[in-house]
């Protein structure tokens, strides 16, 4: 390398380093960035978030985002970005309602702790004592599951809330596994003890006292259209159905091949031989998808798969028709039966159309909206960033349950996994994450096509809420929470 080349490389490196320093350094007047944007002047934090969120929404194809931030027990920032539906123009605001199912578990735990204070529930007594019927079929488990087990995800009940499974995987209290069905069980117990519907119970105990006017497990059908629609990349629903279908068909093909060769001593398969495999493939894929994701995901996936197949076939037919017309033009319009048969279908055209369609698979497509009356304690909560920030502020300030009960929800936690310096665990209704620089409690929501996160840092009396209407928002919500609170690695369920 010549001296001139070395000098050029050094100068380029210096320029790049200077630019990087300017971009990554905090705004003028901001404090040490290690503490996160929460320590910055409010206007500078808002400006930085506006720029960062807009950039990341475009990169991740997230149609809409709502953010609210709590500092010193008060809401200091709330903002919406983008649209509630990619096919519409309704802007997202801090009051836009999202499906936030999983986050509702922490709100439910908060209400349950109120009932503990009132003596209506007990943390360490079987929940079955509060009801007359046996909700959990397993008698031994029913007699053992306590409120503490449910709040800490140690009940043994599954997380398959869309299927309503009441099976118990392990002895209550002996292990950990995310168990949304435990909260469905708890909702039933709370409703029986209070003698009122769970949604009404939560409105009276939590939503109304804290001013959460945009929250509800059941909402009027007229408001259902105002809830942000979930979105996902087109390839997700298509492969969710097509993947298992192709796998089942291939297994059926191989089994048919073995039967015909070993049982009937035939070396070649006839099209009719594959009818059973062709029938079982979509049926088996439907059963598998329903079991894994529930009925909504099944309908959503089959719908987009059929639309995709129909589009591919129509475009292939259009190409074949164009080839036929152009071919006849070249033959002076003479049409023969042989030429018509020859141009009826072209595997090459079909393959090329399928390959071309792959370039559109990242397109965000909307999901079916949940009915306003569709109730599930672990799934159907609709709320806004503003309302959830009000809950976080109320929790930080010890409203409704007092400081001591609030402290129990954080302090009575168990470690589940993680290395020293970043230990993950569960408290009473929250996941916990303990690092060298402090403790955070948090809860995610992961309804199909909708991702959200609430993180509370008790020591700094701070919190951040991020709600998105796309599965790709799971990256953005982690990034925003990390930048706001100054924590680099993400919050993930243990």
Image (spheres, rainbow, N blue to C red):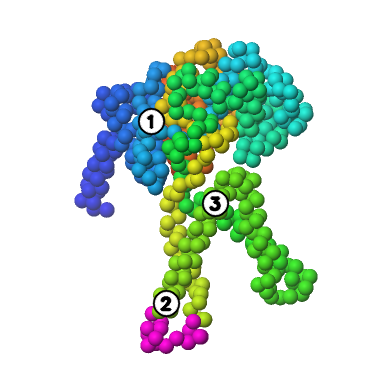
Query: Is 363 drawn above or below residue 406 in the view shown?
Result: below
Helix, strand or loop under label 1: loop
> Is there a contact, CB below 8 Å, between mark 2 and mark 3?
no
Which residue shows up at 31% across the image and 34% down it?
A: 50
Find out whether residue 336 is within the magenta segment.
Answer: yes
In this orientation, which residue lies closer to the viewer: 492 or 65? 65
Which residue shows up at 55% across the image and 35% down it?
A: 373
Which residue shows up at 71% across the image and 75% down it?
A: 267
Q: Give the residue pinned by disc 1.
A: 94
Residue extent of the magenta highlight: 326-340
Query: Marks 3/1: CA distance?
Result: 31 Å
* Image quarter hosting the C terminus: top right
Q: Give the residue pinned by disc 3.
A: 301
Query: Is 41 drawn above or below residue 284 in the view shown?
Result: above
**Mark 2 burial class by Cα count in 10 Å: few <14, some 14-19, many 20+:** few
Helix, strand or loop under label 2: helix
Residue 277 left/right relative to 139? left
- What is the quadrant of residue 59 in the picture? top left
Q: Where residue 421 appears, x then y in whole percent?
A: 52, 26
Query: Marks 2/3: CA distance?
Result: 33 Å
Q: Where residue 379 appears, x then y in whole percent?
A: 56, 35
Query: Marks 1/2: CA distance?
Result: 54 Å
Find out whether residue 293 is within the magenta segment.
Answer: no
Q: Where residue 73 appears, x then y in whole percent?
A: 41, 17
First of labels 1, 2 by sequence position: 1
Q: Give the residue pinned by disc 2.
A: 323
Taking the image as drawn, is residue 392 in sight?
no
First of labels 2, 3 by sequence position: 3
- Chief secondary structure of the magenta span? helix
Helix, strand or loop under label 3: helix
Residue 11 left/right relative to 428? left
Q: Where residue 389 appears, x then y in whole percent?
A: 43, 24
């Amino acid at each position: 390398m010549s001296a001139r080349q070395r000098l050029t490389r050094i100068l380029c490196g210096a320029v790049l380093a200077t630019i990087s320093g300017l971009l990554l350094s905090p705004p003028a007047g901001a404090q040490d960035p290690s503490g996160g944007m929460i320590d910055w002047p409010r206007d500078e934090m808002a400006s930085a978030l506006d720029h960062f969120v807009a950039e990341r929404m475009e990169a991740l194809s997230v149609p809409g985002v709502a953010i609210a931030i709590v500092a010193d027990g008060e809401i200091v920032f709330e903002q919406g970005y983008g649209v509630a539906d990619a096919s519409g123009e309704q802007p997202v605001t801090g009051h836009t309602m999202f499906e936030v199912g999983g986050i509702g578990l922490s709100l439910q735990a908060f209400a349950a702790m109120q009932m503990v204070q009132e003596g209506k529930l007990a943390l360490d007594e079987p929940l079955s004592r509060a009801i007359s019927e046996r909700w959990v079929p397993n008698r031994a488990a029913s007699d053992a599951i306590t409120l503490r087990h449910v709040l800490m995800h140690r009940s043994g009940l599954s997380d398959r809330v869309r299927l309503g499974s009441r099976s118990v995987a392990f002895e209550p209290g002996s292990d950990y596994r995310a168990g949304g069905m435990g909260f469905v069980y708890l909702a039933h117990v709370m409703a029986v003890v209070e003698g009122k519907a769970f949604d009404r119970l939560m409105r009276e105990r939590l939503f109304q006292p804290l001013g959460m006017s945009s929250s509800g497990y059941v909402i009027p059908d007229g408001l259902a259209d105002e809830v942000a629609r979930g979105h996902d990349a087109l390839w997700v629903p298509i492969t969710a159905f097509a993947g298992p279908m192709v796998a089942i068909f291939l297994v059926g093909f191989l089994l048919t091949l073995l039967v015909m060769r070993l049982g009937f001593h035939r070396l070649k398969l006839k099209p009719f031989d594959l009818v059973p495999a062709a029938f079982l493939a979509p049926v088996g894929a439907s059963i598998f998808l329903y079991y894994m994701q529930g009925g909504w995901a099944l309908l959503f996936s089959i719908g987009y798969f059929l639309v995709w197949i129909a589009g591919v076939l129509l475009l292939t037919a259009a190409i074949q028709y164009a080839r036929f017309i152009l071919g006849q033009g070249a033959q002076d319009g003479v049409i023969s039966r042989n030429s018509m048969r020859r141009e009826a279908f072209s595997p090459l055209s079909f393959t090329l159309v399928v390959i071309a369609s792959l370039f559109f698979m990242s397109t965000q497509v909307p999901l079916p909206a949940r009915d306003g009356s569709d109730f599930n304690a672990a799934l159907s909560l609709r709320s806004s960033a503003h309302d959830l920030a009000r809950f976080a502020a109320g929790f930080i300030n010890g409203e409704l349950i007092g400081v001591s009960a609030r402290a129990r929800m954080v302090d009575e936690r168990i470690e589940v996994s993680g290395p020293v310096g970043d230990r993950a665990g569960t408290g009473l209704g929250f996941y916990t994450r303990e690092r060298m620089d402090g403790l955070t409690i948090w809860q995610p929501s992961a309804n199909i096509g909708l991702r959200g996160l609430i993180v509370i840092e008790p020591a700094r009396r701070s919190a951040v809420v991020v709600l998105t209407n796309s599965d790709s928002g799971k990256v953005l919500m982690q990034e925003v929470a990390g930048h706001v609170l100054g924590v680099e690695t993400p919050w993930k369920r243990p």
